[in-house]
Amino acid sequence: MNYYLGVDGGGSKTLAVVADETGRIAGRGISGCGNHQLGAALAERSIRQAVDEALAQAELERESITCASFGLAGADRETDFRILRPMISGMGFKKHQIVCDTVIAMRAGTRQTDGVVLICGSGTNGYGVNAAGEEIQIGGFGYAFGDFGGGGDLAVEVFRTVVRSWEGREKPTSLTSLTLDELSFGSVEEMFHRFLDEGRRAPHTLAKLLFQAAPADEAARKILARQGLELGKVASAVIHKLGMRHDAFDVVLAGSVLTRGEGDYVVPYIEAQVSAAAPKSRLRILTLEPAAGAVLLAMDGNGVVPDAAVYERLHHELAVKGRNMEWALD
C-alpha cells in the first residue's frame, strides 16, 4: 500500500493528512501558522507538529510515505523557496514537493491536473496550469501590485463608503447603520474621529456587511460587482498567458467571498469574462479542504492517475464543513 502526505500551511492554520492510495485518510494533524512570511521558525514548528501528529495517528514512519506535497501560503517567489527548500527537505521525506497554497486549492477543486483557480479570502490571488504543465500566478501581492479585493480591501471600501455618505459625497447607504452597529459607535462622526485619533484601520469583519446590505443597497452591490470584475480580469489574464482559450478545464473559486452562497453579487461578473475568454471552461466552487489537493498532487507526483473512487472518498472525508466568513486561503 502506498501512502501520501498532503499539507496545507496557511497563516492561521496548518492541516496535514496522510492518505492511502484509495483516498482513505489514515491520519490527520492540525497546528498553527504555516506561513514562513509570518516567521520561519514558527512556520517550521507548526508544519512539523501537524505532520508528526498525522503520521502518529496513521501509525506510520516517514519512510512509509511514497510522496509528500506541501502547499504553503507565501510560497510565491524564488526568495521564498530559498527559505522553504531546506526547511521542508530537513523533514526527512524521500520524495516531496513544495507549491503555493493556491496550487493545492486548484487541485482540490478539479479532477484534472490542469485548470485555473481564483482565491478571494483575506486577499486575492489567481493561478493556472495548462495541459502542457506551464503555470503562472497572477496576483497575491496586494493593492499596490495590481490586486483589488479580499477581506482587507473590501472592508476599507465599506468604511470609506460610509464616510463619503456621511460627508455628502455619496448617497445614503444601509452600510452606515450596519457599520456603526458592528463597530459599536453612535455616529459616523464619532467613528471618523476615533479612527483618525487612534490610527485604527477598518477590520476585515466589515466585509461581511456587503452581503447583508446588497439585496437592497446599490453601494454594496457596486463594491461586490467591482470585486467580480477584477477577479474575472485575473482569470482572463491567466487563460490568455497560458494559451488555454480552446481548452476544457475548471475554474475553481475558493475563499470565503466566493463560497458564501448568499446571493450572486460577485460570481456572475467572473463567469461572463471567463466564458468569453475560454468558452469550454466551467466554474466550480471549492468544496474540499485544500489539503485534499495536496494529497492529489502527491499522487500526481508519483505518476498515479486517481480514479473516481479516490475523489469520492476524499470528498467524503475532507469536505469543507460549512461556509463562513473566516478569511481562509491567505
Image: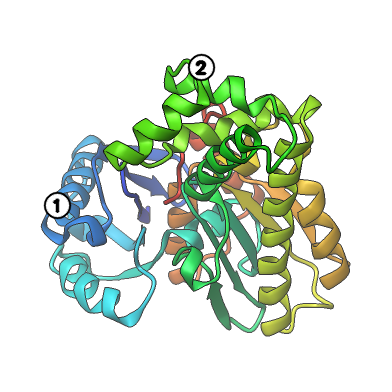
Against 165, is 249 above or below? below
Compared with 173, 62 (above or below) is: below
Q: For this view, does 325 lie left or right of residue 118?
A: left
Please state which of residues 206 and 188 is positioned toward the viewer in this rendering.
188
Tag 2 and tag 1, C-beta contact below 8 Å? no
Q: CA distance from mark 2 to mark 1?
A: 36 Å
Q: Residue at x 68, y 24 (%)?
A: 174
Q: Position of residue 163 (x, y in %)?
A: 56, 37
**Circle 2 sits in a helix, a strand or a loop, which is it?**
helix
Mark 1 — residue?
42
| Residue at 34 percent of width and 70 percent of height | 97
Residue shown at 38%/42% (left/top)? Answer: 201
Residue 49, quarter of the rendered image = top left
Residue 197, quarter of picture = top left
Tell me which numbered mark, 2 or 1, is placed earlier along the sequence. Answer: 1
Name the element at disc 1: helix
Mark 2 residue type: Asp
Q: Amino acid at mark 1?
A: Leu
**Residue 269 in picture, x, y percent from top left:** 80, 53
Q: Please state if 194 lies on the left or on the right of 141 as rendered.
A: left
* 268 or 17, nearer to the observer: 268
Q: Is residue 259 left or right of residue 324?
A: right
- Residue 220 appears at what percent x and percent y? 70, 37
Task: Say which of marks 2 and 1 sits in front.
Answer: 2
Could you say which quadrant of the image residue 305 lies in?
Answer: bottom right
Do we see residue 1 in this rendering?
yes
Q: What residue is disc 2 on?
A: 181
* Image height of 12 relative to 302, above or below: above
